[in-house]
Amino acid sequence: MKSAVYFASLRAHSDQESTTVKVQRLFDRAGFFDVVAQNDRTAIKLHFGERGNDGYISPVYVRQIVDKVKACGGLPFLTDTNTLYLGSRSNAVDHITTAILHGFDFAVTGAPVIIADGLFGKNVAQVKIEKKHFTTVTIAGDIAVADSMIVMSHFKGHIVSGFGGAIKNLAMGCAPPEGKRAQHNARPFTITDRCSGCGTCAEVCPKTAITIEKKRSLIDRDLCIGCFECMHVCPEHAIDINWETEIPVFMERMVEYAYGAVKAKQGKVGYMNFLIRITPDCDCFPFSDTPIVPDIGILASKDPVAIDAASYDLVNQQTGFTDSLLTAHHHKGGDKFKGVHAQTDGYRQLKYAEEIGMGYRTYDLIAI
């Protein structure tokens, strides 16, 4: 079976082809007016970007969806969940402040910001899914009770999951810290021959699981929560994980959380992927690296698997930028995400998501 995925390129020759107009058209063509009913409390699921990052979706594009939801009679709110790691989004006060600083305030978007898991990530709901790794999953309370949802995802690379799109936005993005921790089964370890003992990893660890002993970092696996912040910041690349045994399980656990986030919302969720500024890493980083391929366009679908599959294919059809973090597979057809993070296999997300019934990897790409 194939799912419909609607595509708008970024080419424009008149005001009727502006990006904002195309966002509105995608909402209509994808049939999102069937998703939002009168008086629906409609969650617009976003990533507001870590402070210092500027790769997140423009609030101007978000405004177009807010206005469309209101035209359907819905009551939209912008939402995300608190982070597992320390940063500018680890509690609702800092998170909302960061969102506002990045332009997601009411004057621009026309909708309030509500952090779905509460002040400290304790507003949660248990959702029964009965899958391989989880019987129940922990979802942010205000996402769980929302009547409908529009998931707006910045499609980009990721150090562990290969890429981040609609599925990852559901999985990590709709889970409170407790749920994020449950997904992160992998635990990093130090490659002592590379470690210089600089202590950068210990400084960012949210659980003080890292100490410096004999000029080498030591990770306490019992205290570690698997947030991978130490891997991100290590200047010597001296921290690693077991890619062959732990990461395939992590992928599946992540997909099961995505399934749980929308299990009670069948027919009530729409997805939009923005293939703009396709950076090598997540918007959780407090910076944005140069893109790995040219800007491509925007996609919309009611199928999270199909929209991620189409996004993945469109990225790989591009010629990669040689002056970016991309070190291999620059040619058209090459796996760009493996060209950035060679040990990842992002496509595993799509295979398992299809296996558990989230959607289909086959799609019809319909240009508008």
Image (cartoon, grey):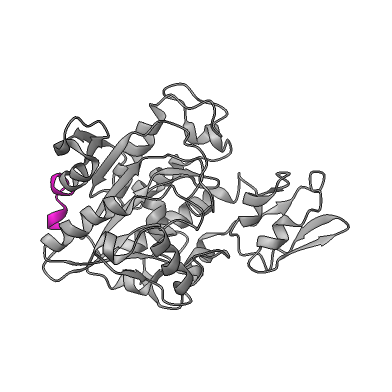
In which quadrant is the N terminus drawn? Answer: top left
Residue 63 position by quadrant: bottom left
Where, by quadrant of the figure, is residue 174 drawn?
A: bottom left
Q: Can residue 131 be seen in the rendering of this structure?
A: no
Residue at the farthest top position: 331
- Magenta-colored span: 27-35
Residue at the spot 81% in from the left edge and 53% down from the top edge: 197
Q: Is residue 278 visible?
A: yes
Q: Residue furthest right?
A: 214
The residue lying at 65 percent from left, 48 percent from top is: 242
Q: Looking at the magenta stretch, what is its main secondary structure?
A: helix
Q: Is residue 22 left or right of residue 275?
A: left
Residue 30 lies in the magenta-colored region: yes
Say whether residue 87 is left or right of residue 274.
right
Q: x%, y% of residue 260? A: 36, 63
Residue 133, horizontal then vertical, whole percent: 47, 61
Q: Quadrant of the C terminus?
A: top left
State the count of labels.
0
**Which x, y percent locates residue 246?**
59, 51
- 304 with respect to 21 (left or right): right
84 sits to left or right of 61: right
The quadrant where residue 99 appears: bottom left
Task: Check residue 83 for magenta coloring.
Answer: no
The residue shown at (11%, 60%) is 71
The front one of 277 and 261 is: 277
Between residue 293 and residue 167, name the one nearer to us: 293
